[in-house]
Amino acid sequence: MITKYTSGSPIDTEAVVQSFPPRKITEFPFKNALGGGKFTFGFEMEDGDIVYGLGEAPRGINKRGWIYESYCSDDPFHTETKSSLYAAHNFIVLSGSKTFGIYIDFPSRIRWDLGYTSQNSAEITVGGTDFDIYLIEGGSPREIVREFRAAIGQSYIPPLWAFGYQQSRWSYHNAQAVDRVIEGYNKADIPLDCVYLDIDYMDSYKDFTINSEAFPDFEAYVREKRAQGIHLIPIIDAGVKQEDGYSVFEEGREKGYFCKKADGSDFEAGVWPGMCRFPDFLNPEVRRWFGEKYKTLTDMGIDGFWNDMNEPALFYSADGLKKALDKASSLRGDNLDLGKFFNLKDVFLGLSNSQEDYSSIYHNIGGEMVNHQRVHNIYGANMTKAAGEYFEKAFGREKILMFSRASFIGAHRSSGIWFGDNHSWWSHILLNLKMLPAANMCGFLYCGADLGGFNENSTRDLVLRFLALGVFTPLMRNHSALGTRDQEGYSFEKPEDFRDIILVRYRLIPYLYSTFRRASETNDMIFRPLSFDYPDDAVARECETQLMLGEECMIAPVCEQNAGGRTVYLPEDMTFVKLSGENVEKQELPKGLHYVSVALNEVPLFIKKGKKIPLCKPAMRTEELDFDELTFI
């Protein structure tokens, strides 16, 4: 049962699609306080209670013991000390002595103190007085998730080819570089479906333009790659370059489509192209305008996109940079002691994603000028909705691949997400795994991390172990940063090991795709904590390194350097399967703890008793797979 409690006049985030009669916030059945421009409520927890949820967030599957903040943040250092990442997914489920779910439909800051200040107390602070809170009661955690997911609408389903293996890097800067990637995979006989085009494919980093020197006849090139079975996936950023003669900028300026400052002038800030202006995606008219701009690229044969930098990420604002430069100028010739030097340093370090800059932005919502800080968390989601609304209108559903960095519940109906700029750290394999069920709870089924890690230099074994988890994630994309070591599968010694892992992915696509569709259509999860399926099993309830997959399987990746295997807990008798290329090894194992050996070219999988999964023959492209000729494990 879902009960809606309303305070003030909430901004419509479009997150919830079902209608619920509102009750007054004074009837909310938790200890609470409304005042001082915020709302605080809390509940007590027993020692064994678990808090699930918050989607894309740091730390564990069980969110107890830390403070989290719902505030979309451009922060590439995903460490345990952080409280927020790129998304704001305001849904939790408490399981244990009592079981219920809470969704807070509020587009600004929320502070979740889940046993940090007081071990057995949760205190949640909503940073405003205009919001809806949905309380979901009755049933198991999985049933609560299903009821919530029905309320927010069916999850986005991408085209089938988006389940193929995908290769990205910042940056394959011209057609020759892209060709080298495709040739490298072809020569190594490793399947590949997509190659990504990061910011260098654009003319001077301008959205919906092509660098004609790098890609002289882009439309013909896209057509040529499609004939080879390869989809090219370009990036689109939130900032529109401020340049006379650039049509997107000229149109946006003429029609008043950019975010404003308090004095009515356009807000200006620097990103990749230098000084930019930012479309006011909270205005439906602007969404329609910007969404139709994707036609420039779809007309050239592009059928997939990733939206980036849409928190929005700001390198500096025009006002902020002027203040910083004035400060530096005022200190010219001074003897910079400890205080003066660090103050100057902090001025420049504080230019990016400044709270002062965010507070100076205004949006037009229904004719009212609304400060950005009141709606920060839905800016990126509305950019992605702009694209999704256009794609569905122009092509129908399930035709275009779309995923985004910043997100809010509701955007799950038009796109997937990736988990942002992670690192080539072993701990980030586990972080990827822990985010999967939480993202699914919030409707984001098409999701995944940058396999191998985006930042810093990866190692051969780390990429292989990362890929062995990525075999199961709907988005299977290897992505790395400019200046880091090459981490394409053919770039390391013994590329046949990478081939063995990626072939497994292609053999599993019939199973993964059908599991995905079923989860979308029934408002279910692809990935679940073990405790969802084994609530009375004390070991399963505390397990943070394994997940249930669909109705049939459990996954348990190896995520430690130099490890030849791992210890795994089986909550029931299962078949341990090692998949490598077209090889399948099986071993029946009883319930309990086991050490299992897993070579670098093997993918471990555990199949429940009485269940089976299909495998197809592998192919170099998803379009070549035969779903009619299947074998079963």
Image (spheres, rainbow, N blue to C red):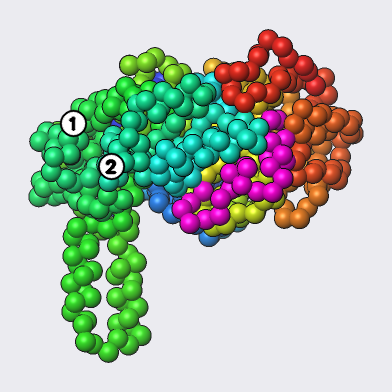
527 relative to 265, above or below: above
In the picture, measured across the screen, residue 10 lies left or right of residue 454, that is: left
State the residue position of label 1: 366
In terms of depth relative to the viewer, which is nearer, 28 or 611? 611
420 relative to 561, above or below: above
Mark 2: amino acid: Asp
Q: Which mark is residue 194?
A: none
Q: Quadrant of residue 591?
A: top right
In the picture, measured across the screen, residue 227 lies left or right of residue 505, that is: left
408 relative to 397, above or below: below
Mark 1: amino acid: Gly
Coordinates of residue 478 in the picture (x, y in percent): 56, 41
In terms of depth relative to the viewer, which is nearer, 216 or 577? 216
Q: How many marks?
A: 2
**Tag 1: Cα neighbours inside 10 Å, few (<14), some, or many (≥20)?**
few
State the residue position of label 2: 203
**Tag 2: Cα neighbours inside 10 Å, few (<14), some, or many (≥20)?**
some
Q: Which residues are magenta?
A: 480-504
240 relative to 391, above or below: below
> Quick one: SS at disc 2?
loop
